[in-house]
Image (cartoon, helix red, strand yellow):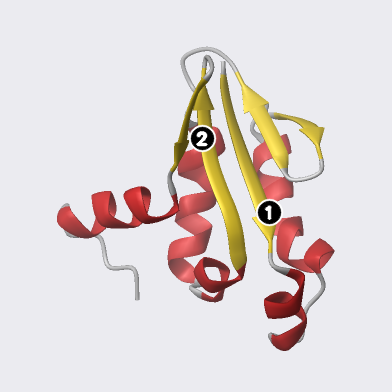
Amino acid sequence: MVTATYIFNEEKVIAAGKTVEEMMAPIQKMLLENGAEEIAPGVFCKDGFYAMDVIDLPLIYIRKHLKYLDALDIWTMDIDGEVEDCKEGMINYYKKRGYALE
């Protein structure tokens, strides 16, 4: 089971002229449409072959909307109890492999 948590800094979201709900909506929509379950606000889980979708799908969106990087306070991944703060790790992973984040 893979669980991903996306928690926004409300002050930064408001400064960007949005609400937390507006910022969460595209992430929530893509994850729910692809079989993830929202077990708490901003916390999504998925099991099976495509379990990493809970990290990978939002990353695709975030790469195109960099304001999310600043607005996210918590972006963690939990794989069977092993928790990792993946915001910087995922950014660096994709940069090293030639994916533009800007």
23 relative to 4, above or below? below
26 left or right of 38 in image: left
Residue 7 is marked as 1
Q: Is residue 102 left or right of residue 27?
A: left
Residue shown at 26%/56% (left/top)?
92
Image location of residue 42, percent across then percent down: 74, 45
Residue 2 x, y percent position in the rendering: 55, 23
Q: Amino acid at mark 1?
A: Ile
Q: Quadrant of the C terminus?
A: bottom left
Q: Which residue is mark 2?
A: 77
Is disc 1 placed on a helix, strand or loop?
strand
| Picture residue at 68% right of the left edge, 78% below the top | 12
Give the left or right position of residue 93, taking residue 28 as reference. left
Residue that appears at 69% across and 67% down = 9
Q: Is residue 76 above or below residue 74?
A: above
Helix, strand or loop under label 2: strand
Q: Amino acid at mark 2?
A: Met
10 vs 101, nearest the viewer: 10
Q: Position of residue 89 (x, y in %)?
A: 33, 49
Mark 1 touches mark 2? (CB < 8 Å): no
